[in-house]
Amino acid sequence: MITARAVRHRAFAAKEDIELSPHVLLVEDDPDTSALYQRIFRMKDFEVSSAIDHLGALDLLEQKDIDLAIIDYQLPKLNGAELCKLIKQNAATAHIPVIVLTIESTDEIEARCIAAGTDAFFAKPPVFDDILAQAKLLIGRTKE
């Protein structure tokens, strides 16, 4: 599927011979953790939008061209696997890769995330180089 962002990306890249920054949606309810992740991704030339819950995340997914969602598992009301499932069930957002992060890294939680369509799963605290590498890999696959 060719999105409006892809068309703009190609037109801009052809005109300026540069790439647009990938746009990450970060869904994290802890303000300190969110600020840290945002800072790290921005330092690596990602555009970042953030939400503290599933409602904010779903609004941003409607408003912005998101290339990747990074979701905390322990969110208020809906957990990360449930939000992932909503993203994957919606035809407009099903193509967006999802990474879930959790402090409670159990086989049961990982299985829930995989069943929901999660593309990658990391325990907190994550090794940021691993998340960044996975993010670039997943974004690269969706751009092909």
Image (cartoon, rainbow, N blue to C red):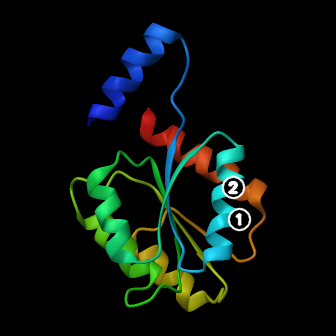
Q: Nearer the viewer, residue 121 or 6?
A: 6
Q: Callout 2 environment at 10 Å: few (<14), some (14 to 19), or many (20+)?
A: some
Is residue 41 shown above or below 116?
above
User: Which residue occupies the extreme left position in the image?
Assistant: 91
Q: Which mark is residue 36?
A: 1
Q: Position of residue 113 (x, y in %)?
A: 48, 77
Mark 1 Cα shell of 10 Å, populated few (<14), some (14-19), many (≥20): few
* Whether residue 116 is situated above or below residue 133 in the rendered picture: below
Hey, what amino acid is under mark 2? Arg
Residue 56's quadrant in the figure? Answer: bottom left
Residue type at numbered disc 1: Leu
Q: On residue 39, which mark appears?
A: 2
Q: Where residue 32 sits: x, y (%)?
A: 68, 75
Percent position of residue 10, x then y: 39, 19
Quarter of the view holding residue 94: bottom left
Q: Secondary structure at mark 2?
A: helix
Q: Cβ–Cβ below 8 Å for labels 2 and 1?
A: yes
As drawn, is 103 to the left or to the right of 128? left
